[in-house]
Image (tube, rainbow, N blue to C red):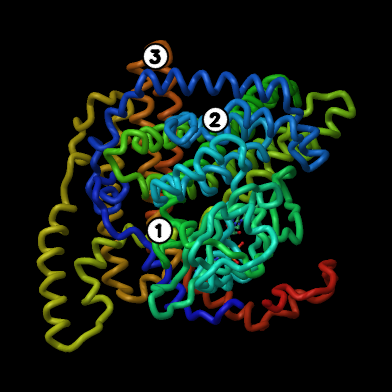
Amino acid sequence: MATHVSEKEARDVVEAAREAEWKLPSFGKQLFLGDFRLDLIHPQPRLDPEAVEKGERFLAELRTLLETEVDPLEIERESKIPDHVVDGLKKIGALGMKVYPEYGGLGLSQLYYARALGIAGVYHSALCTLLSAHQSIGVAEPLRMFGSEEQKRKWLPMVAKDHISAFLLTEPDVGSDPARMGSIATPVDEMPVAKGYDDIVAHPVEGGYEITGRKLWATNGTVADIVVVMAKVPKSDGHRGGISAFVLPYNTPGISIEHRNQFMGLHGIENSVTRLEKVFVPEENRIAREGDGLKIALSTLNTGRLSLMAIAVGASKWATKIAREWASERVQWGRPIGEHDAVAQKLAFIAGSAFGLEAMLDVSARLADDKRNDVRIEAALCKVYGSELSWRVIDELVQVRGGRGYETAASLKARGEKPVPVEQCMRDMRVNRIFEGSSEIMHLLIAREAVDTHLEAAGGLIMGDGDAKAKADAAMKAGIFYGKWLPQLAVGKGQNPRSYEEFGPLACYLRYVERSSRKLARSTFYGMARWQAKLEKKQTFLGRIVDIGAELFAISATVVYADRIGREQPERKAGAIELAQLFCAMAKRRADTLFHELWANDDDDRYAAAQKVLAGRYSWLEEGIPDPSGDGPMMPPLD
Ligand SMILES: Cc1cc2nc3c(=O)[nH]c(=O)nc-3n(C[C@H](O)[C@H](O)[C@H](O)COP(=O)(O)OP(=O)(O)OC[C@H]3O[C@@H](n4cnc5c(N)ncnc54)[C@H](O)[C@@H]3O)c2cc1C
């Protein structure tokens, strides 16, 4: 049964699960503080030759499998990945790409894992969704990060080989707000005497939990073998309680699949509504401590979020190819359409964006592999920026393809044309802005990190809690911090026209990032000073702060990436610099607009208007239009 949860309680639950510590340096965190640490991302870490060899070998096998076994039209038509394809993926070790070899996996680097997802995703999105739900959020990653050695030895070899996994967090009443979680894990002293448990639990166990709840939208949830389930343990004597994570075989008695969900896109994914009715889970299957569940979910997603960027990169690179081929072949009004200015602008946008997105992924994935930096912010920026920008890329691709962009691949094929699945790509890409942290929630999570130092320095003052002495102490603490920090934001390398000269024609963009990083930090400070505790309600302001940070990270990554290509592949140097210039100019223009809109906007008017819409003031506007939605509650009563 879901519980009523106030806004504050919802926030407190997420705040408690937040990883508060920063043990390693973070480019993203410093960027938001006005400290442009180019040295943290440049030069890019070199790849270990052995990892490259292993990665390339796997990519070759994956490509062969896709080209010989997979018919994307069949997956789309049947809404099913054929068994022989799933078996093929298992055979080449695709289920264990990220699992370390000592537990039976391939142990690919983050970079090659990302490339593999990008390749599989372009072939058909259902394939990369299967693989990414299985190992970016499914059993492998939470266990890798938080599992005991015993748990790793037991479960990882299975999920690395042929056991498909899923991650069950969402519920009908729990989307972006885990505090409402209704699934309950009740501690029990002994295993129930019920048919079927002997097969699941190999030896007698003392105690454990009985989980009851209903989970929505679990990807792989109709075909999984092993799952991670999130459920709330009630607080009691000897039980810390709280949202906790459990790993369990999916054939445990009490688990039933109620429905296979169908979506706008991602046809072929196996997504379930799963009922858990008094499902016994031995204590040894709890991952980490009671109450650590949400922390596990959020931490799992840290690098997991790079998977969505990998999909964004794959789709954008493919879009570049299709747009190029089509816009040079299709002639209208006497010229190839790519030579008409309106279409040419779109082509440039598509190609430049593909380069920028690839740069962000490459920089972030190498940092993740290198393990000397904290990539939390970069990965989160990749998720939100990659899913948003690639959506626009695909939207422009649809436009460039004209009517054919709107036609299904099957229909194109049926009338004798190349079955280019642009229409499908658009449907498939849309969900990336919703799942694994919607764009709105990602903005809030990243904004929380962006203002973290301010909260530490001036939290007491901003929140206005405590007596006069506490307030005076807080004011003194804030005064000391800002007295030192603010002057540092006045000047920097970006003002010197000769800075970053070694980057040639791209140096001006690094100077722009350095200057803008300080401006961004000042803007954040002004926002804090102006709205104080109310700043957290200014989601649109905070969203722009995050989006500016994302553009600045994107520009930095693009310059660094182009620089590496130039040094490692001199024959591509000129082209890489051109693409980087193309992307950086667009990103700079977007950042400038966002800076302007921080203070020149109609946010308050629109918020007020929305409240009037909610109150029904303009409901006459809806008159005269029938609603084809049919009957039934928008939110069914909770069980
Ligand atoms: C195809 C698909 C696969 C999925 N796979 C899985 C899976 O494998 N496992 C799993 O556990 N879940 C899965 N999900 C669930 C997914 O993670 C959720 O859809 C997502 O978390 C958003 O929750 P929601 O859809 O309930 O939206 P809601 O939380 O109802 O949000 C609705 C809208 O309100 C916005 N919003 C909500 N709260 C706030 C706020 N505080 N401030 C500002 N805006 C806000 C959201 O951004 C969104 O735009 C899947 C979903 C889909 C569609």
When asked about the image quadrant of residue 336, the answer is: top right
Q: Residue furthest bottom?
A: 467
Is residue 74 depicted above or below 452 in this figure? above
Please tell me whether mark 2 sits on a helix, a strand or a loop: helix
Q: Earlier in the sequence, mark 1 or mark 3?
A: 1
* CB of mark 1 near ligand 1 (< 8 Å): no
Is residue 461 depicted above or below 104 in this figure? below
The dot on residue 116 is 2
* CB of mark 2 near ligand 1 (< 8 Å): no
Residue at 38 percent of width and 20 percent of height: 565
Please tell me whether mark 1 sits on a helix, a strand or a loop: loop
Mark 1 touches mark 3? (CB < 8 Å): no
Along the horizontal axis of the image, is 482 left or right of 109? Answer: left
- Foreground mark, 2 or 3, reads 2
What's under tag 3, amino acid-wise?
Answer: Gln
Give the CA distance from mark 2 to mark 3. 22 Å
Residue at 40 percent of width and 40 percent of height: 554
Q: In this view of the protein, which residue sits in the foreground, 421 or 123?
A: 123
